[in-house]
Amino acid sequence: MEGLEVAARRRGLTDLLLDVGDHQPEALAFYRALDWSETWRESGPEWHWQTVWFHRSLSRDHLAVEVRPCADEADVEAAERGLPTGDNGFHRERWERHVAGTATYLLAWDGGDVVGHVLLLHRSKYPEIAAAVGHHPEVNALGVAERSRRRGVGTALMGAAAAVAQQQGAHLLGLALEPGNEAATTLYRRLGWVRHPSLAPVDVWSWVDERGIEHDEADRCRYWTLDLPRQRP
């Protein structure tokens, strides 16, 4: 595996993926011991096992995380500890969407600590986008704790979101990004996302400051999409 990583770097690759069945405990233990990140578990009606997808970043100081859906109130509290939102309660709001079945809220765990999150909306929240390119799932609220940035966590979260969307039958994934976010722009381009200059939705949201005053924001965004394979590799 070390030789494989060396060869991949020589070819200019930045990330590696692999999958293994959860009925192979020795293989699971092997990849975990090598600090690969567990990004998603996939199941099928004809399978008697789950496929566990792993990711490893080659271009950074890789941090091995486990990405899994937010499961309960305890996970919400852990997310608030790891990436505090204060009185805004964003983690709870996303969890409520997850429970309602309109979204999937994914958390990245470093041991017992939440170090990242991403919300997969099952449908785009922008009517003008749906009218232009059709209904499709949409990535929202990608965030990584400061100490864990540039270590492959964002890539693992985005890969998990794409896997969920594809497992739900989607062939296209979208996201809206504020201009000027160069780090995110670099990430999405590296992952194969394409920007659509003609699509510029306005993201309307609100937040509460330390004095308890609510502020309304309206940001003109750039829209990006990712084509998903018709069939899992």
Image: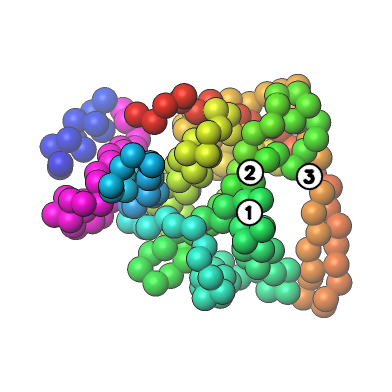
Which residue, given by chain and number where applicable, does mark 1 sit on?
101
Number of residue marks: 3
Q: Quadrant of residue 183?
A: top right
Classify mark 3: residues with Cα within 10 Å, few (<14), some (14-19) or many (20+): some
Gap in Å between the C-alphas at discs 2 and 3? 17 Å
As for residue 27 lying within the magenta part, the answer is yes
Depth order, front residue of 73/31: 73
Q: Which residues are magenta?
A: 12-36
Say which label, 2 or 1, has the lower sequence index.
1
As drawn, 7 above or below 41: above
Name the amino acid, label 3: Asp
Classify mark 2: residues with Cα within 10 Å, few (<14), some (14-19) or many (20+): many
Which mark, residue 122?
Answer: 2
Name the amino acid, label 1: Gly
Say which label, 2 or 3, has the lower sequence index.
2
Please name which of the two marks, 2 or 1, marks the residue nearer to the observer.
Answer: 1
Side of 80 relative to 130 (left or right): left
Assign a secondary structure to mark 3: strand
> Where does residue 146 sit, x and y in percent of width and height?
51, 61
> Where does residue 194 sit, x and y in percent of width and height?
58, 25
Which mark, residue 203?
Answer: 3
Classify mark 1: residues with Cα within 10 Å, few (<14), some (14-19) or many (20+): few
As for residue 150 lying within the magenta part, the answer is no
